[in-house]
Image (cartoon, rainbow, N blue to C red):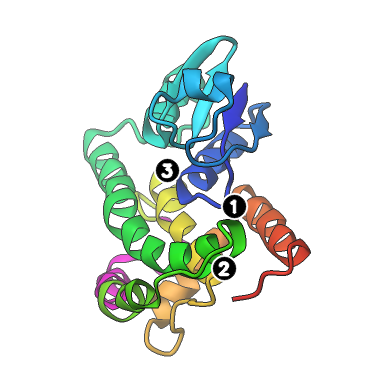
Amino acid sequence: MIIYGSTMSPFVRKLVAVISEKGLDFKLKPVGYQDADPAYRAASPLGKMPAMDDDGFGLADSSAIIHYLEAKYPEPAMIPADPQARGRCIWWEEYADTVLTPAGGKIFFNRVVAPAFLKREGNPAIAEEGETVDMPKICDYLEDAVPEPGHWLVDDTLSLADLALASPFVNLSHAGCPVDADKYPRLCAWLAFALARPSLAGSIAREEAFLKKIGFSA
């Protein structure tokens, strides 16, 4: 199985974590946004990462790929079978994908992607909006919503919900904008617990090493 993308993307990082939790063999092939690689574009018509080639079967979008893998390799389950637990799990992933990631993306793109990868200045006003307007609202909500550290979001069992919610916060750390531990102690403690999971920690270590190698510091 080939996964196209970079774990610098919260979506790719989430997918790689799910694959790792399932113990599946895969190769991560680095590509960039709108990359012209023909195999990648065959799997991802929109040119967005991640994309997958599983023995000739191509598929794009992290959620679509994860649901495919969950059906093909059901153990260990990353999406609960119980209807209510499944609903909560999918809701958390949707929240991470459509609320948290875009807010954090304002910061990450303008403080990391633009200067480090595109070699141009980011927009500081947009990054500031993400940091001072968007993220406080999200963190205020999550401070009360996440469980105590040592526990998982849905039925106290590791699931896609945890991997999806924790992943975008890695990008904030790369951008020099970690969650304020004094203001959000519960959220920070839960994040430390979740991000220590080897399926996430391995990607984080590689990303930090790469940023150091290219001389980037937030």
Q: Kindly report the distance in space between the C-alpha atoms of the residues bearing marks 1 and 2.
A: 14 Å
Q: Residues within 10 Å of mark 2 (few under 14, many from 20)?
A: many
The answer to which of marks 3 and 1 sits earlier in the sequence is 3
C-alpha separation, residue under disc 3 versus residue under disc 1: 12 Å
Q: Nearer the viewer, residue 136 or 80?
A: 136
Which percent across, then down, holds residue 166? 46, 58
At a point 48% along the width and 55% down the height, the residue shown is 167
Tell me the kind of residue under disc 3.
Answer: Leu
Q: Quadrant of the N terminus?
A: top right
- Quadrant assignment, res 103: bottom left
Query: Pointer 2: what residue?
Result: 174
Q: The residue tagged with tag 1: helix, strand or loop?
A: helix
Kind of residue at disc 2: His
Disc 2 to disc 3, C-alpha distance = 22 Å
Instruction: Provide the major secondary structure of the magenta segment.
Output: helix
Q: Is residue 63 left or right of residue 145?
A: right
